[in-house]
Amino acid sequence: MDLSQVSLWSESSASGGSSGATTTHAAETGKQFFVTSISGHTDADSVVEIKSGTTCMWETKVDVSVEGFSFSFNVEAVPIVPGTLTTGSVSAGTSRINITGFTV
């Protein structure tokens, strides 16, 4: 792989209302995205997801009574279908979500 063709990216949501938060990385024709981490905070038990278009590629639950309000997961390299919107979301609570990754 020619590393000069790899670019890093990061997306963050604004602090949400009381119904979770979502952030996206826009699709690019002919480009392959990989998500390497997802992090954020929430004040309610939630489901955290990484999606390729509408397909869930990775998910976990956050139990705030056990794990606290802040979360961070290194997810290695979750592949996103080329030319497809990348979404990171947290399902509930006053929340914020961040996703990072790279493009080939």
Image: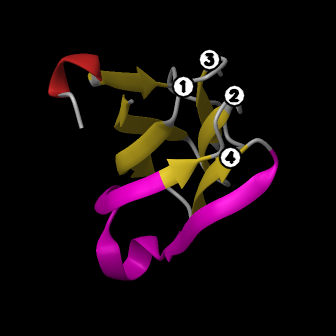
Secondary structure found at label 2: loop
Any magenta on residue 95?
Answer: no
Q: Name the residue under label 1.
A: 31
Quadrant containing the N terminus is top left
Numbered label attached to residue 83: 2
Q: Mark 4 points at which residue?
A: 52
Q: Earlier in the sequence, mark 4 or mark 2?
A: 4
Does the CB distance between marks 2 and 1 fall below 8 Å? yes
Give amino acid for label 1: Lys
Secondary structure found at label 3: loop
Q: Nearer the viewer, mark 4 or mark 1?
A: 1
* CA separation in Å, label 4 and label 2: 9 Å
Please say whether residue 40 is visible from this viewpoint.
no
Q: Which residue reaches farthest bottom?
A: 66
Considering depth in this image, is 101 or 11 the residue closer to the camera?
Answer: 101
Any magenta on residue 56?
Answer: yes
